[in-house]
Amino acid sequence: MASPETAVSRRLQSVKNIIIVLSGKGGVGKSSVSTQLALNLYKSSSTARVGILDVDLTGPSIPRMLGLDGHGVHQSSDGWVPVYADGAEARLACMSVGFLLKKKGDSVVWRGPKKNGMIRQFLSDVRWGDLDYLVIDTPPGTSDEHLSLLEHMAPVHSRLSSVIVTTPQAVALMDAMKCLSFTRAVNLPVLGLIENMSGYVCPCCGEISNVFSTGGGEEMARREGLKFLGSLPVDTDLVSLLDASDVKQGPDDSSEPSSTPEKPAESFELLGRYSETSSAKLFQNILERVATSLGELAARE
């Protein structure tokens, strides 16, 4: 029996794949993984259209990582206009509560119902258009935001999948298990698991040292029957790039919104600089495995 049409299903009817990025605890680099996933999907094809939705309402970091701090959301006759990270290309759309704050340092002090309403607006009122992929960065854990997200997207459940991010430490893996338990309880397909911060890349010689430990994520994936998507060591070049939002605004290096708010940058400097990092090369293998998992999931449907 077909699901009843809703405002969310109408808005997302032209979105082919929706990938929810999850983590059991904070501090494992989930948002940086979400950003890298969106960038790699974007550069996988010259025509790929990608959206990234930041529903980490109390800690929105995606705007800064994409160099979009200072931009605001604008209303059109067809809904909210997302902010485009790639300028005139308009193939990488971003939406975050960070665009709605008067000051980027303002806190978001909302109870569950208001969070639920905000997520519903992001899904039903944003002019996403035709997207090949919508990457959704969520808060750590499994809370109101996750339940609201899945409730509103129930009519498009067949296009939903997820990626779990963990670090190698035992405490992170324990929380990742809770995250996996959540996906099974709500019947959310898991494309695989990424072990982040798996060692440290020396910026001088490129040697990888195990700061914490390594291999725990791969072992968990093997034990639980998940696809292990790959490991990502701590990369100081990537950290510097995603932190330095002031250098990625475009030719005039302005922190003010452009005169065309939905297309803030004339050139996509971020992508070029990201492609030079060691993380970008490692993520290519991860992306191939994500694509394989998406293909297997589609074949099962």
Image (cartoon, grey):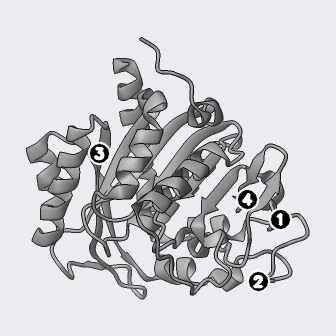
Displayed quadrant of residue 44: top right
Give the residue at x 27% y 34%.
187
Nearest to viewer (mark 4 / mark 3) = 4
Residue at mark 1 to residue at mark 2: CA–CA distance: 12 Å
Residue at mark 3 to residue at mark 2: CA–CA distance: 37 Å
Q: How many marks?
A: 4
Q: Mark 1: which amino acid? A: Pro
* Label 1 close to label 3 by CB (< 8 Å): no
Nearest to viewer (mark 4 / mark 1) = 1
Place of residue 213 in the rendered image (x, y in percent of width and height, measured from the top left): 15, 74
The residue closer to the viewer here, 31 or 197, is 31
Residue at mark 4 to residue at mark 2: CA–CA distance: 15 Å
- Tell me which label, 1 or 2, sits earlier in the chain: 2
Q: Mark 3: which amino acid? A: Gly
Q: Which mark is residue 192?
A: 3
Nearest to viewer (mark 3 / mark 2) = 2
Name the outermost residue toward the right: 259
Q: Mark 4: which amino acid? A: Tyr
- Tell me which label, 4 or 1, sits earlier in the chain: 4
Name the residue tied to disc 2: 255
- Determine crowd level at label 1: few under 14, some 14-19, many 20+ residues with C-alpha closer than 10 A: some
Residue at mark 4 to residue at mark 1: CA–CA distance: 8 Å
- Tell me which label, 3 or 2, sits earlier in the chain: 3
- Tell me which label, 4 or 2, sits earlier in the chain: 4
Q: Which mark is residue 261?
A: 1
Q: Is residue 273 visible?
A: no
Residue 194 horizontal side relative to residue 84, left or right = left
Q: Mark 2: which amino acid? A: Ser
Q: Which quadrant is the N terminus positioned in?
A: top left
Name the residue tied to disc 4: 84
The residue closer to the viewer here, 9 or 231, is 9
